[in-house]
Amino acid sequence: MQQFFTILGGMGTLATESYVRLLDKRTPIHCDQDYLNYLVVNHATVPDRTTWILDHSQPDPNEALIEDIKQQSLLNPAFFVLICNTAHYSFDKLQAATEIPILNMLQETVNEIKKIKPDAKRVGLLATKGTLAANLYDPYIEKAGYELIKPTPEIADMTEDLIYHDIKEAGHSDGKKYHELVRKMIEEQGVDVVVLGCTELSFAEEMDPETKYPVADSQSIIVDRSLERALKLRQK
C-alpha cells in the first residue's frame, strides 16, 4: 500500500474507533477509492499512561509504543497519529524512535484555539490526572499567550469518573456528566474555552449532543490535521 499513514491507537479502543469514524465521515468521497489509506494499530494492552506517570514503578507504556513505532516504520508510513493525549508525556522519546513524523496532538490543539475562540484569554483544561500532574499542556498553552486554568480537585475527580468508570470500564459515555464538566469549567472557573485533553472526552463529545460551550476537542482537531496531510499525499 502506498500513500498511507499509521494510527497508533488502543488507548483506549473506543476513542480510537471515534477517531476513525470522524476521519471517514469527514473525508470527501464519491466512491470506495476516495477514502484514505491508513493502518490502525489498536494496541489495547499498552499499560495505562496515567498509572505509570503517577508511579514509575508501574508498567511502562513506552516500551510497547516504541515497539509499535519501530515495527510500523518498516512499512514506511507517511506519518503517525498518536491517539492518546497522556501518551504525549513521552513524545520526544517516541519521535526519537523513528524518522517518520508523529503529529503532535497537544500542539495542534492549542494552535486551533485562536480559530475556535479568537478573543480567548483563559483556557481551561479537562484531562486525566496523569496529564494534569505532568503539566503536559502547560508549555503549549502558556507559550501561546493564554492563562491556563486547571480543574479543581472536584472537577478532576468527576473527569476521572467519566473517563475510567463510564468509558474505559463500562464502555459507554454519560452525556450528563460530560456536559456538567464543561459547564463547571466555563461558568464556575471562568474560562473562555475548554481543551478536551483526553480522547475519551472527545468520545463523549461525539456520542452525546455537542456542548453549547466552546471546546478545543483534541481528537477532532487531530482528525482534521490527519485529513489535510493525507489528502496532500495524493497530490504528489
Image: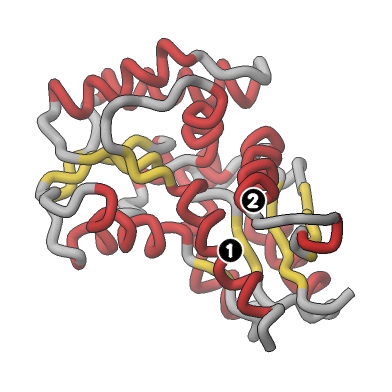
The answer to which of 109 and 224 lies nearer the viewer is: 224
- x%, y% of residue 121? 10, 49
Where residue 167 sits, quadrant-wise, is top right
**Marking on residue 141:** none
Taking the spot 72% from the left edge, 56% from the top edge, the residue there is: 29
- x%, y% of residue 176? 42, 11
The answer to which of 143 and 36 lies nearer the viewer is: 36
The answer to whether marks 1 and 2 mark residues whose Cβ atoms lie closer than 8 Å is yes
Taking the spot 56% from the left edge, 24% from the top edge, the residue there is: 207
Taking the spot 18% from the left edge, 60% from the top edge, the residue there is: 142
Type of amino acid at the residue the image marks with label 2: Leu
- Give the residue at mark 1: 226
- x%, y% of residue 118? 17, 54
- Spatial separation of the CA atoms under disc 1 and disc 2: 8 Å
Type of amino acid at the residue the image marks with label 1: Ser
Taking the spot 38% from the left edge, 56% from the top edge, the residue there is: 109
103 relative to 206, above or below: below
Q: Residue furthest front?
A: 30
The answer to which of 139 and 114 lies nearer the viewer is: 114
- Give the residue at mark 2: 23
